[in-house]
Image (spheres, grey):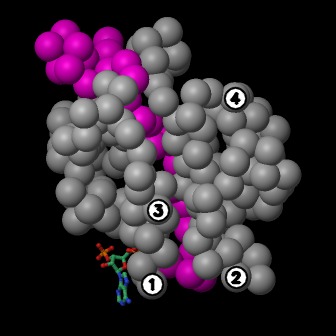
């Protein structure tokens, strides 16, 4: 039910992923599924070590993806500017960056989100992983904490928290 897709396969179902994205983030500022499918995903799919996992039955129920992040990229630089230099030096650059996790509302609450996150990071060589999520208490941050992620910064200043996972793997970071 959960599959790991490469860049080409991911872009091949970009429209469907955009629909899942729009349904999961409905009502939020950045919930434009078409922009996700035509701009965000193609840009990110070109990044180092891009990896996307998808939960699928007859249709796509959810997905998660990430890549290796580096200074000079928008997200890395924005986070680095918002945290202490020591924390930035320790965590940013060569980290695995989890960019999106989304499950359609009808399929939420069955463990699919947790299974996607587990599959996404499984076997990766990165020592450090990073993501931003909501600073307030809701399903997504609870899910990350259950899976062992730690809160690095509770509020970056715009309602997002920075979470990190030190895998202990002596890998590329
Ligand atoms: C965050 C998100 C991906 C989680 O997906 P999900 O498939 O619902 O995740 P899970 O099912 O693994 O966990 C969700 C909840 O269901 C519970 N749950 C999981 N399996 C369950 C089961 N078999 N029976 C009862 N409850 C269960 C979990 O304990 C969790 O509960 P909590 O919210 O009280 O902590 C989903 O809610 C979503 O797409 N949200 C909108 C987009 C979003 O916020 N993305 C993350 C941005 S950082």
Q: Residue at x 31, y 64 (%)?
A: 143
x, y percent for residue 140:
36, 60
Q: Is residue 37 above or below residue 171?
A: below
The mark lying in front, picked from 4 and 1, is 4
**In the rendered structure, which segment of residues is drawn in magenta?**
80-108
Residue at the spot 36% in from the left edge and 36% down from the top edge: 126
Residue 162, visible in the rendered structure: no
Q: Which residue is mark 1?
A: 110
Question: Is residue 3 highlighted in magenta?
Answer: no
- Whichever of labels 1 and 2 marks the residue nearer the N terminus, that label is 2
Residue named by callout 3: 119
Q: CA distance from mark 3 to mark 1?
A: 16 Å
Q: Earlier in the sequence, mark 3 or mark 1?
A: 1
Q: Secondary structure at mark 2?
A: loop
Q: Quadrant of the N terminus?
A: bottom right
Nearer-N-terminus badge (4/1)? 4
- Residue 57 tag number: 2
Along the horizontal axis of the image, is 86 left or right of 98?
Answer: left
Ligand 1 image position (quadrant):
bottom left
* Closer to viewer: mark 1 or mark 2: 2
Q: Of the two numbered discs 4 and 2 on the same chain, state the one appearing first in sequence.
A: 4
Q: Which residue occupies the foreground of this view, 151 or 2?
A: 2
Q: Residue 46 — which label?
A: 4
- Left or right: 52 with respect to 140? right
- Category of crowding for the residue at label 4, using alpha-carbon neighbours closer than 10 angstroms: few (below 14), some (14–19), many (at least 20): few
Between marks 2 and 3 in the image, the one whose residue lies nearer the viewer: 3
Q: Work out whether residue 55 or residue 136 is closer to the camera in this orientation and state it.
A: 55
CB-based contact (under 8 Å), mark 4 and mark 1? no
| Spatial CA span between label 1 and label 2 | 14 Å
User: Of the residues under marks 4 and 3, which one precedes in the sequence?
Assistant: 4
Q: What is the x, y in percent for residue 129?
A: 33, 38
Q: Residue at x 78, y 52 (%)?
A: 9
């Amino acid at each position: 039910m959960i599959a790991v897709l490469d860049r080409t396969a991911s872009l091949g179902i970009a429209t469907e992923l955009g629909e899942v994205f729009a349904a999961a983030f409905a009502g939020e500022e950045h919930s434009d599924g078409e922009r996700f499918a035509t701009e965000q995903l193609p840009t990110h799919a070109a990044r180092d070590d891009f990896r996307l996992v998808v939960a699928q039955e007859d249709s796509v129920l959810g997905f998660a993806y990430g890549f290796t992040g580096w200074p000079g990229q928008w997200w890395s630089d924005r986070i680095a500017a918002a945290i202490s230099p020591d924390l930035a030096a320790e965590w940013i650059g060569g980290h695995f960056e989890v960019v999106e996790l989304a499950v359609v509302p009808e399929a939420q609450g069955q463990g699919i989100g947790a299974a996607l996150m587990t599959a996404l990071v499984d076997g990766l060589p990165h020592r450090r992983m990073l993501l931003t999520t909501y600073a307030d208490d809701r399903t997504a941050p609870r899910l990350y904490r259950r899976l062992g992620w730690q809160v690095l910064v509770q509020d970056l200043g715009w309602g997002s928290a920075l979470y990190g996972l030190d895998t202990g793997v002596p890998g590329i970071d």
